[in-house]
Image (cartoon, rainbow, N blue to C red):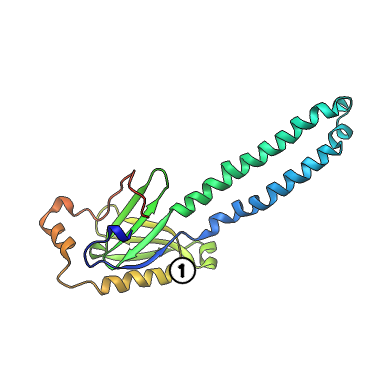
Amino acid sequence: MRKELLPGEQVIVVTRPQPRTLIVPALLFVLVPALAAYATAWIVKGGPAQLTPLIRGSAKEWTPWLIGACAALAAWVLLGYCLPRVMTWNATRYTLTNRRLVARYGMWRRRDQQVSLATVRNVVIHQSLLQRVLRSGNISLETGHPTGIMVPDVPEVVTFRNFILDAINDLPHDGDAGSEEMMHNPDAAWPWETREGGRDER
């Protein structure tokens, strides 16, 4: 992000979504290996042979397959469910500067949303009951255009909203170079853009 700052632009805050979406993956990350280890020990001790008489005579032949099935199931849960959600959360970033708000999503296929603070007319907070408990929420930026921007699950949403309002109040009254360019070029007046395949911000 630092390489993409405009002249005179300064970063106010950089944050990620509220990590409540990682609660279930974190629990599974702890429970699944423990359950897999317990199931493996139970199989090695001959538990399936005692439970199912059909495999009692060939328990040693079934043991490697059952252990492999337990390991494969555990790996599927960890790599197929937990890891993608952690990577999605880590790749999502909200950056507020003194001129714009940038929301970036995705690691392999990146999606960017940007809105110039000079075009923002209203800042609205939406909170569910759980979000109120966790002090997070969704922030909607109304720009006067049919399509606005909504930033989901912002942590400390009230503080983040206040940062936005302070940045808007600190904008020059005569507008910056970006807002003047929008006024002279109506085709460039769209307040935010979405694009995929952008470079990593690092």
Towards the viewer: 19 or 138:
19
Which residue corresponds to mark 1?
A: 156
Which residue is found at the position 12% from the left and 54% from the top? 185
Residue at the farthest left position? 184
Locate residue 115, reporting x and y percent.
Answer: 28, 58
Locate residue 15, reporting x and y percent.
Answer: 43, 63
Residue type pointed to by label 1: Glu
Locate residue 106, reporting x and y percent.
Answer: 42, 48
Which residue is found at the position 30% from the left and 48% from the top? 194
Q: Along the horizontal axis of the image, is 165 left or right of 185?
A: right
Which residue is found at the position 10% from the left and 57% from the top? 184
Q: What number of labels is visible?
A: 1
Q: Along the horizontal axis of the image, is 24 left or right of 84?
A: right
Mark 1 burial class by Cα count in 10 Å: few <14, some 14-19, many 20+: some
Numbered disc 1: secondary structure:
loop
- Residue 173, compared with residue 90, is above or below; it is below
Towards the viewer: 192 or 202:
202
- Residue 5, compared with residue 105, is above or below; it is below
| Quadrant occupied by the C terminus | bottom left
Locate residue 182, reporting x and y percent.
Answer: 16, 57
Which residue is found at the position 16% from the left and 63% from the top? 177
Locate residue 56: give its quadrant. top right
Locate residue 69: give its quadrant. top right
| Quadrant occupied by the N terminus | bottom left
